[in-house]
Amino acid sequence: MAAEVTLLILTWNGLDYTRACLESVRQHTAVGAGVEVLVVDNGSTDGTVAYLRGLDWVRVIENGRNLGFVRGNNVGIRAIPTGDVVLLNNDIVIQQDGWLEELRRVAYSAADVGIVGCRMILPDGRLLHAGAYMPLDSFWGQQIGSLEKDVNQYAYDREVQAVTGACMYIKRAVLEAIGPLNEAFFSYFEDTDYCLLAAEAGFRTLCAGGVTLVHHENVSTKVNKASFSKMFYKSQRTFRKRWGRKLMSKYETRVLWHSEVGSPSGYAVSSRELILQLDALGVDVRLAYLYGTDWMDTQQDDHRIAAMRQRPKDLSLPQVVYAPGELFIKNSGRYRIGYTMLEVNGIPADWVQLCNALDEVWVPSTFNAETFRASGVTSPIYVMPLGVNADYFNPRIRAFRASLRYTFLSVFEWGERKAPEILLRAYARAFKAEDDVLLILKVFNRDPSVDVKAQIAALDLPPGGAPVALLYNQEIPAHQLGSLYRSVDCFVLPTRGEGWGMPILEAMACGVPVIATAWSAPTDFMNEANAYPLQVKKLIPAKAKCPYYTGFCWAEADEDHLVQLMRHVYGHREEAAGKGQRAAREALEQWTWRHAAEKIKARLLQIDRERA
């Protein structure tokens, strides 16, 4: 009976790794039940061949010499006349049952899926691979998520540009359409080349989030003391020649994006997410730093963003200034777009004047569309929502609970707008020392004139109350922040106003029930069905150090209602968890950065048509 799937493993010395790989295959794979294992040896001299000959459950082909990764694998592919093929490196270790069945499930989840890879971790537990992409400036392939702490990010099945050949499930339909690997390559770049060829033939490449393998990486090169750089750069030149122009032709429209990406500000974080998604959707982004020259922006770790910086700043393109409204004066494009937000019930007169000098204005929420119009903005206003990173914020992210107590969490920058005094007073009223609860405050304070400890002491909270843990100015990498949300039972924020409400949406995407003020931008994505909206007592003058707020109002949350809601979720945990699950579904189905970028792209294409 012909195998439905053949695992194809290429060896070139490295016996210890090969033995560990095959033992893990045998332990976690139903070999023989429609599954065959074929090992192709590239002239090993360390006892590998003798070892392989002793395995009666493995088919072996001996090449007798090193044909390279591509030609060696192709010997195997041509020896497999039927069924699907899984390329598997001999330095892979499998640790989960059902891994192959899950790869196969993903491969047959749609007819146009042709290639499937998976998550990979290093032996030390760090994430190594969750798909790959090819930057168009360096042509140095990048592995998504590489070297991040593994908290089970990228746990959903996702379409990617490429996956590594260290584990590549190839459906028979792909092999019939495009044949084996491209022998223009000896080693390196052949996997991305193959995924791109498959895409040209109409097949998508997916990364299976439910499979995680251990990869020692580059073992053959190290064990055999081969010249990595010689092979790599030769293959890189070949790849650039084959794909450089084709990959640049993917872009359907262009935009000059004038903002920042390197600081921890909300504008920088959201700007980075938006332009990466725009690039993935086929928008040629030309990035310009708003506060100086490009080299002054501190973000350096993403090759795609580096490429955006290096492209010409073409002023004939639509130019988006994404920043506070006072900076719209820096928009020098022929078609000028201002993209901003404000947390109060109006905008300053100079903002109105600058907005009305633009071709159009973008805001993230219907709240700001209304406040901008009411303030006198007559330029066209479009709602362009922000989003959430579904790879880092979802219910599958690993939790690391600090306590078994029912835990509330609030994440904010200390200041009047976030109303920390309302939260602390309400918590002290809602719970006593004997209640099995904990409140965690993850707080940033960048104002040296503000003494957070003194402000808390001035609240004169009753002594001996329910515990509060303060995470003060502690940096948590963005890819790990979801673990903080997943480690608590309820998120709470009695904010006085939000331009978007990123922590609220992040908590919702993680499946955590949310209590937050029912006012300003979050009302676009937060409602009675998916959260616990906190009633507004009244609008009050917005008193803070921010000059944009002068003369305007924001919301004062109802402290009594907050006490009631905190007690309610504490006493109705199953109901609260259900709301959290619904919130996660809606966030991931409607409010991701991908959704946000799709809306922006659609508007840019419409502008192109209008200007043609």
Image (tube, helix red, strand yellow):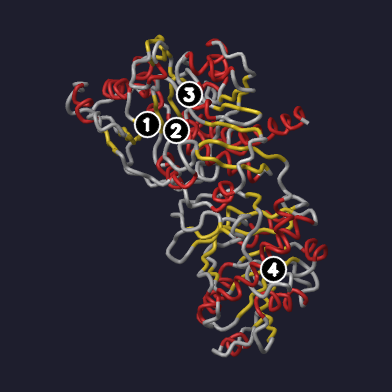
Q: Are the residues flagged by discs 2 and 3 in contact, CB closer than 8 Å?
A: no
Residue 98 image-quadrant placement: bottom right
Q: CA distance from mark 1 to mark 3?
A: 24 Å
Q: Quadrant of the C terminus?
A: top right
Residue positioned 55% across, 34% down in the render? 387
Residue positioned 54% across, 67% down in the render? 94
User: Which callout, 2 or 4, points to the residue nearer the camera?
Assistant: 4
Nearer to us in this view, 490 or 436: 490
* Residue 348 horizontal/vertical position (percent): 46, 15
Indicate whether 463 appears above or below 15.
Answer: above
Q: Which element type, helix, strand or loop, lies under badge 3?
A: helix
- Determine whether, in the image, residue 34 is placed left or right of residue 91: right
Indicate whether 97 appears above or below 315.
Answer: below
Nearer to us in this view, 195 or 260: 260
Q: Are the residues flagged by discs 2 and 1 in contact, CB closer than 8 Å?
A: yes
Q: CA distance from mark 2 to mark 3?
A: 25 Å
Q: Which residue is mark 4?
A: 238
User: Which callout, 4 or 1, points to the residue nearer the camera?
Assistant: 4
Q: Which element type, helix, strand or loop, lies under badge 2?
A: helix
Q: Amino acid at mark 1?
A: Phe
Q: Amino acid at mark 3?
A: Glu
Label 1 Cα crowd, 10 Å radius (few <14 / some 14-19 / many 20+) = some
Q: Which residue is mark 2?
A: 503
Indicate whether 56 appears above or below 500.
Answer: below
User: Which callout, 1 or 3, points to the residue nearer the camera?
Assistant: 3
Q: Are the residues flagged by discs 4 and 1 in contact, CB closer than 8 Å?
A: no
Q: CA distance from mark 4 to mark 1?
A: 49 Å
- Determine whether, in the image, residue 552 is placed left or right of residue 388: left
Q: Which residue is mark 3?
A: 326
Residue positioned 80% across, 70% down in the render? 82
Q: Which residue is mark 1?
A: 412
Q: Which element type, helix, strand or loop, lies under badge 1?
A: strand
